[in-house]
Image (spheres, rainbow, N blue to C red):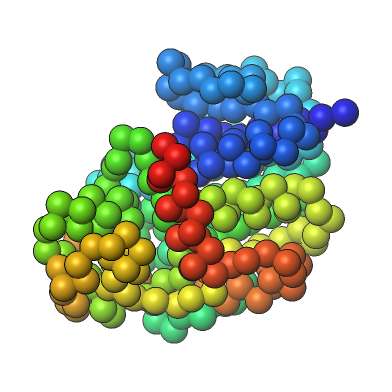
Amino acid sequence: MNKNVLITGISGMLGKSVYRSFLKSEKYHIHGISRKVDYSVSGVTMFYGDLSSADFVNSIDHIFFDAIIHCSAEVNVNLCEKDRDLAYKSNVEATMNVFSILKAKKYLYISTDSVFDGDNGDYLENSKVNPLNYYAETKLLGENAVKECTPSYYILRTNIYGFNKPIKNSLFEWGYSELNKGVELNGFANMFFNPLYVGQLAELIEQIVEKDIEFGVYNISCDDKISKYDFLQKIAQEFGFSSDLIKPVIFKQTDLIAKRALNTTLNNSKIQNAIKTFDFSINKGFSMLKKDLKNE
């Protein structure tokens, strides 16, 4: 019998990627939630509504899911800083509703490396959290809500890259689009992370659903700890753009509306020990990215 899985935020970049990964295996009855009433994809039972509405979430509580993958979130850091009500509803109230009302064997919550303040880097799952902006604060409040609602959780702290159609303004999409046009870019040489391609995360999520690994918090990152400048250089290298277009600059907190952490690199040894055969390298991520971009 096929397993019932629910993907919230299925119309977003991560949700779409998770959907594709689960669809390929043909083991699942996929359910999706989106606020976009005109959004539909093949092989999915869709529900349309706002997860911050308990009435909406209650309308689907008759289904038991083998896994719920909670991808839905407001991830625009500056918008979260400016519209705190929206951020709280999207990232905290919605999470509380999903994890307290809906019934599942496994619950997966997608969190962020931004729960850390970036003073040290190489953070472990039990390192001290100290979010610097309201987006990160709401994601941490979401983590706490998850822990209060169920013991059957996986909290996945991560930083992802990928692309939307049409192209939006994430770091990869901005870098790729501008370099493709021959535009000079500034890259922060003092801001470090170890991002994972969204397709890698989607495949890993399927393995977590399938395998019997211990519940808890996991850092999900690539093995390569790099600066934002290095990441832009990687885009240029992989897609044949001129690396001379990218200039290293020093990030200053005054440059943006919301504070940013300088070093959110994650130690991913816990998930590596749990799923030993998975390739967490940035080279694997870019290989998948190039293939996916070509096929879109």
- Residue 195, x across and y down, in percent: 46, 65
Residue 239 picture quarter = bottom left
Residue 251 picture quarter = bottom left
Q: Which quadrant of the figure contains the C terminus?
A: top left
- Residue 140, x across and y down, in percent: 51, 57
Q: 166 above or below 115? A: above
Q: 34 above or below 215? A: above
Image point (74%, 33%), residue name:
26
Image point (58%, 67%), residue name:
280
Q: Nearer the viewer, residue 62 or 20?
A: 20
Residue 1 seen in the figure: yes
Residue 221 seen in the figure: no
Q: Viewed as shown, does residue 173 lie left or right of 217? A: left
Image point (73%, 27%), residue name:
29
Q: Which quadrant of the figure contains the N terminus?
A: top right
Q: Nearer the viewer, residue 263 or 178?
A: 178
- Residue 281, x across and y down, in percent: 54, 70
